[in-house]
Amino acid sequence: MKILVINCGSSSLKYQLIDMTDESIMAKGLVERIGIEGARIKHETIGKEKKVTECPIEDHKKALKLVMDSLIDAEYGAIKSLDEIAAVGHRVVHGGESFSKSVIIDEDVMKAIEENVEIAPLHNPPNIMGIRACQKLLPKIKQVVVFDTAYHQTMPDESYIYALPYEYYEKYKVRRYGFHGTSHAYVAHRAAEMLDIDFDKVNLITCHLGNGASLTAIKGGKSIDTSMGFTPLEGLIMGTRSGDLDPAILPYIMQKENLNSDEMNNVLNKNSGVYGISGVSSDFRDIEEAQEKGNKRADLALRAYAHRVRKYIGAYFTELDHVDGIVFTAGLGENSPEMRESICKGLEILGIKIDTQKNNVRGKDTVISADDSKVKVLVIPTNEELMIARDTLKLVK
Ligand code: ADP
């Protein structure tokens, strides 16, 4: 069975065709600059030459048409006919309180996703456009939706409620939702396998450290707390996002800098994080390089970043009876031994000790804790596409 996984952003679209008989990737690609000048599709069928086509791509429907054409291209394609695709799995960012699991798409589901646009105005609309376009292009093929928020729907109310007037929750659904759920769930399953513990018994703290970053406390395989909140802005320091701060700073800066709420939101999402502190870049490789050259603000950004992660790990320890493993994943978590070491340095008190040599690893499933560490520390490359494909297969089978 072949499953097509689609991840639609506002101006980009990522896709993978996965053969579920052995979970191997048959083809993958990226459409960039949809609706903007300089649009292109980069397609790769595994084992064949990569193909980059530049052409006007006015909307998501045209983007998906190009994806379909690339998949069945006689020279560069991976399949002979679109009928070979058993189902399509779509990533949708915000399922709100309506979805705690992946679901097969029907009109009721579409309505519920559309209702959640109000709380996810940046993310859900492009996801919806992708689904609508796919329904038109592949009308006979079942479509499934997998939500970033779904895995966190098991959080108890004391984890998700904000200390605001309760009617804001009732009227506006203001509460913690959490994101990166597909990634946290994927690495948690893999960690349970690697530690040889049943998934419904495993206690973990999973650290998704990419451009966006979040931590999740997992008890008996279920998310019981996570650092992102009503939006993906809360929690850790990120590439360009502030994460936690004193809410009183917002009106203060808005007044001082004469900013309206959209402008303030933009500062918090685009000009803050390690980029804001360092002034160097939002890419951790650039900041690590600047730190090595003696840039003090780059050094401060990286220390503040590690400090925030440590603080959350400490907090999540108190929510779990015991911790079987700490998992590092995503761009930085998978690839930066320096950051993992820096985070774990203050955590010996919790029984966390990494082995410097084992930690010298990038992008591969490995245990990096010392033999006498009470808590195992693991590096597990995330694979959200595979998780989406697995869920899709389960639902359509
Ligand atoms: P997203 O999917 O959220 O865009 P990724 O999970 O791809 O993000 O992570 C991107 C981040 O990972 C970038 O900020 C980059 O700096 C960091 N990263 C990737 N490779 C390395 C590396 N070798 N060393 C340090 N940081 C890295």
Image (cartoon, helix red, strand yellow):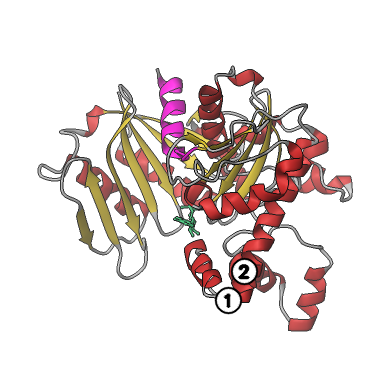
Q: Position of residue 141 (x, y in %)?
A: 33, 29
Q: Camera-side residue: 84 or 27?
A: 27
Residues at discs 2 and 1 in contact (Cβ within 8 Å): yes
Q: Is residue 17 left or right of residue 186?
A: left
Q: Is residue 153 visible?
A: yes
From what the image shows, is residue 299 above or below residue 111?
below
Q: Which residue is mark 1?
A: 295
Label 1 neighbour load within 10 Å: few <14, some 14-19, many 20+: some
Where, quadrant-wise, is the N terminus in this rendering? top left
Prevailing SS of the magenta stretch: helix
Q: Is residue 79 left or right of residue 242?
A: left
Q: Which residues are magenta?
A: 380-396
Q: Is residue 239 left or right of residue 11?
A: right
Numbered circle sitting on residue 38: none
| Residue most extreme to the bottom | 257
Q: Position of residue 157 (x, y in %)?
A: 80, 34
Q: Camera-side residue: 335 or 244?
A: 335
Q: Secondary structure at mark 2?
A: helix
| Residue most extreme to the left | 75
Give the residue type at disc 2. Asp
Q: Position of residue 26 (x, y in %)?
A: 26, 36
Which residue is pictured at 87% across the width and 51% down the height?
A: 164
Label 2 neighbour load within 10 Å: few <14, some 14-19, many 20+: many
Q: Secondary structure at mark 1?
A: loop
From what the image shows, is residue 25 above or below residue 62?
above
From what the image shows, is residue 153 above or below residue 270?
above
Numbered circle sitting on residue 299: 2
Q: Is residue 394 one of those drawn in magenta?
A: yes
